[in-house]
């Protein structure tokens, strides 16, 4: 049976198969070797994620995925006194929840590579131009500073567990004009933003021994099939 | 556990997650309700597909998919006296093989919706400009006429089994400039070609009762969550 990788997160995961997003690119990259399973839940924070963990990953699914991305924080970091307050999770609780999520996976599937991804930076002007709910005071519901604190907490959880982390908050801000280059509405990813997540994931997976060089093909590639005796390749 | 749909076919299936292809679009459309499983094998014809059927669909995978697309014929229809001769499968055998594939699924999973997709039309000029292997006589390895015969055979298998079929060969040629509009190298799909397959699949699935209106969400959508008491949605 083909091994699988699960993408678990919020809307940035849920929409990762739209417009050549990072989920679609991963599936294409590993088209012959890995199943990519989408478990993205728009709007969810780690508090809600914890509540649904056993339903999203039921005991009956026995096979350990080779890898899982855990990509939450953008909603937790919504400010507690603005229009997305109901999605807000305090920083300490976020960290604790992320711990619990990682530990759930580590207990269930000790061999599975868990990869944390921090929330992206926030382009506050972009949020004001594309509000999910209009704020009558003209204030964005998320700030880059808050997102940064959650990103830092996410990195620290990864360090404690000695698991890989993609510090998207940090990475994206290294690019000139990251606000518009990486983010389409101040929060969700553009093509360039998706490509960055994809590239960083491919690099992270490769470092951990998961790449097209190491993952076995289940069936012969066309290039391996002898044109003079094609059926020989299928004597199995 | 979330139901799944399997995409079984040749390169047009294998590359369906590239550049917003039809596989990626399906996954995006059904992001919260269906797993889309990619089983595309570049270059494969129905003869090779039959050889690997039990390996691609091992007995241990007990759950019946809600739907499977079977999308072969483009390689079977490669001409027997040109550069892709080793992929050629005679028309009668193609029809017989397709029968065997459908009957394998119907026996294994009687409730599964099997959807046949015919090979696309061939833009012979496009093939000559983008040959897989250069032909020294300057002849394309596939012709539109041959593809049409295989498409017709595919439709007749669908009729015998009373299962839905997308007659891509027919559908695409109804568009002006289909040669360049639908096909990027005379054979594989452009954005518009991918969109046509996606749209036709969505329509076919809907007719058979599989749509966002009927497939249940496994977890609450953000719009269903009460901002004043979010956790209430997760009391399950």
Image (spheres, coloured by chain):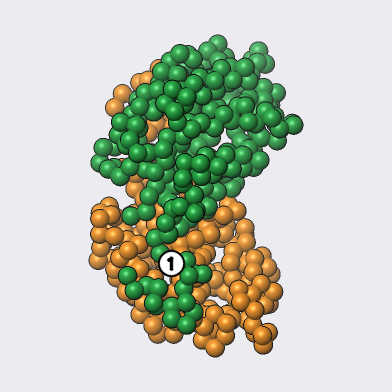
Chain colours: A green, B orange
The quadrant the N terminus of chain B occupies is top left
Q: In screen coordinates, is B150 left or right of B209? A: right
Q: In screen coordinates, is A136 left or right of B54? A: right
Closer to us: A208 or A142: A208
Image location (x, y in percent) of residue B188: 58, 66
Q: In screen coordinates, is B47 left or right of B88? A: left
Q: Residue furthest right?
A: A176
Q: Residue at x 51, y 24 (%)?
A: A155
Image location (x, y in percent) of residue A31: 48, 55
Q: Residue furthest top?
A: A81
Closer to us: A19 or A31: A31
Image location (x, y in percent) of residue A143: 62, 18
Mark 1 sits on what residue?
A: A220
The quarter of the displayed image where residue B116 is located:
bottom left
Residue B80 vertical position relative to residue B2 in the rendered view, above or below? below
Disc count in the image? 1
Q: Which element is circle 1 on?
A: loop
Q: Specify whether residue B173 is in view.
A: no
Q: Residue at x 62, y 17 (%)?
A: A145
Image location (x, y in percent) of residue B189: 59, 64
Answer few, some or many: residues within 10 Å of disc 1's Cα (few below 14, many 20 plus, some between 14 and 19).
Answer: some
Closer to us: B36 or B171: B36
The quarter of the displayed image where residue A232 is located:
bottom left
Q: Residue at x 59, y 71 (%)?
A: B187
Residue B208 vertical position relative to residue A124 in the rendered view, above or below? below
Q: Residue at x 29, y 70 (%)?
A: B103
Closer to us: B21 or B219: B21
Report the chain holding disc 1: A
The quadrant the C terminus of chain B occupies is top left
Q: Specify whether residue B122 is in view.
A: yes
């Amino acid at each position: 049976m083909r091994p699988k990788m699960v993408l678990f997160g919020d809307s940035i995961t849920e929409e990762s198969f739209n417009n050549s997003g990072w989920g679609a690119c991963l599936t294409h990259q590993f088209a012959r070797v890995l199943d990519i399973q989408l478990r993205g839940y728009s709007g969810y924070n780690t508090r809600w994620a914890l509540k649904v963990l056993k339903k999203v990953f039921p005991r009956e699914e026995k096979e350990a995925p080779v890898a899982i991305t855990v990509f939450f924080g953008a909603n937790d970091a919504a400010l507690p006194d603005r229009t997305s307050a109901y999605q807000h999770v305090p920083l300490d609780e976020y960290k604790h929840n992320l711990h619990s999520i990682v530990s759930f996976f580590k207990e269930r599937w000790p061999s599975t590579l868990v990869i944390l991804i921090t929330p992206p930076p926030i382009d506050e002007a972009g949020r004001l131009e594309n509000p999910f709910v209009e704020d009558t005071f003209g204030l964005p519901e998320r700030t880059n500073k808050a997102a940064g604190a959650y990103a830092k907490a996410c990195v620290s959880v990864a360090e404690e567990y000695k698991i890989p982390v993609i510090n998207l908050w940090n990475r994206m801000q290294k690019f000139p004009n990251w606000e518009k280059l990486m983010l389409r509405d101040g929060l969700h990813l553009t093509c360039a933003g998706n490509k960055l997540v994809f590239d960083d994931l491919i690099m992270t997976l490769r470092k951990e021994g998961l790449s097209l060089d190491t993952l076995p093909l289940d069936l012969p590639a066309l290039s391996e099939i002898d044109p003079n005796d094609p059926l020989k390749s299928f004597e199995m």
